[in-house]
Amino acid sequence: MQCVAQNLAPVIRLTTDEATRARQLVHDLKDANDRCAKAKAAWEKFRQNYQAAHPDVPDLRFTADFRLAFGLLNSSAPEVRQVATIELVPEERRELETLHRELIDSEQSQKEAEKNWRDYKTQLIVDHVGISTTGPGGYLMLAGKQVLIPSPWASGLAFTSDFRLAFPQLTPP
């Protein structure tokens, strides 16, 4: 039987600056996720519209130089793979290249925002709780190095909506 006192959870009380930084990073992460979702949707819409305009070429894809669309055709001889190609007009190439660039940039922005948020949470734990050298815990990355975070903090953080308090992300008792 578990003692009732063991159900007490540790807490980190964030400073005003830490809470402000957390809100900003979460805002940046949300913006990056939204931007990435919009870029993916725009790319998919272009692909679907192009596919609809060329129903005779199944599963259209585009070449890396943005000059051709192509699709694998059914062949009477399975050993011979045939591809149908369609040359994109300059306007289509420009649009596809712009969509691709936005997709790549938005994915990079999203990865950076995710990394910044992970680093912030790890640094917050290190600043308030410290690191372990032995014992139960888990490794997290911080500034390219693995640091041993003591239990229960290694499982992540959960924040209050105002980002004034952070708790270890525990499973319910």
Image (spheres, rainbow, N blue to C red):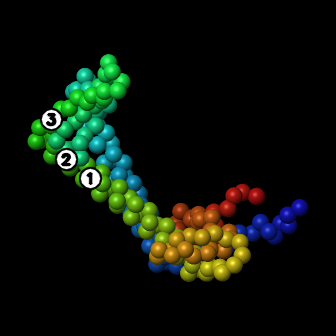
CA distance for labels 1 and 2: 16 Å
Q: Residue at x 31, y 27 (%)?
A: 80
Of the image marks 3 and 2, the number of the one nearer the N terminus:
2
Mark nearest the camera among 3 and 1 is 3
Q: In which quarter of the image is the N terminus?
A: bottom right
Mark nearest the camera among 1 and 2 is 2
Asked if labels 2 and 1 touch by Cβ distance under 8 angstroms, the answer is no
Say if residue 22 shows up in the picture: yes
How crowded is the residue under tag 2: few (<14 C-alpha within 10 Å), some, or many (20+)? few
Kind of residue at badge 2: Asp
Residue 129 lies, with reference to residue 33, above or below; the image says below
Of the image marks 1 and 2, the number of the one nearer the N terminus:
2
Disc assigned to residue 102: 1
Q: Percent from the top left, x then y, of residue 169?
A: 63, 63
Residue at which label 3 appears: 87
Question: Dividing the picture into quarters, in which one does residue 156 lie?
Answer: bottom right
Question: Dividing the picture into quarters, in which one does residue 11 lie?
Answer: bottom right
Kind of residue at badge 3: Glu
CA distance for labels 3 and 2: 11 Å
Dot 2 lies on which element?
Answer: loop
Residue at which label 2 appears: 65
How crowded is the residue under tag 3: few (<14 C-alpha within 10 Å), some, or many (20+)? few
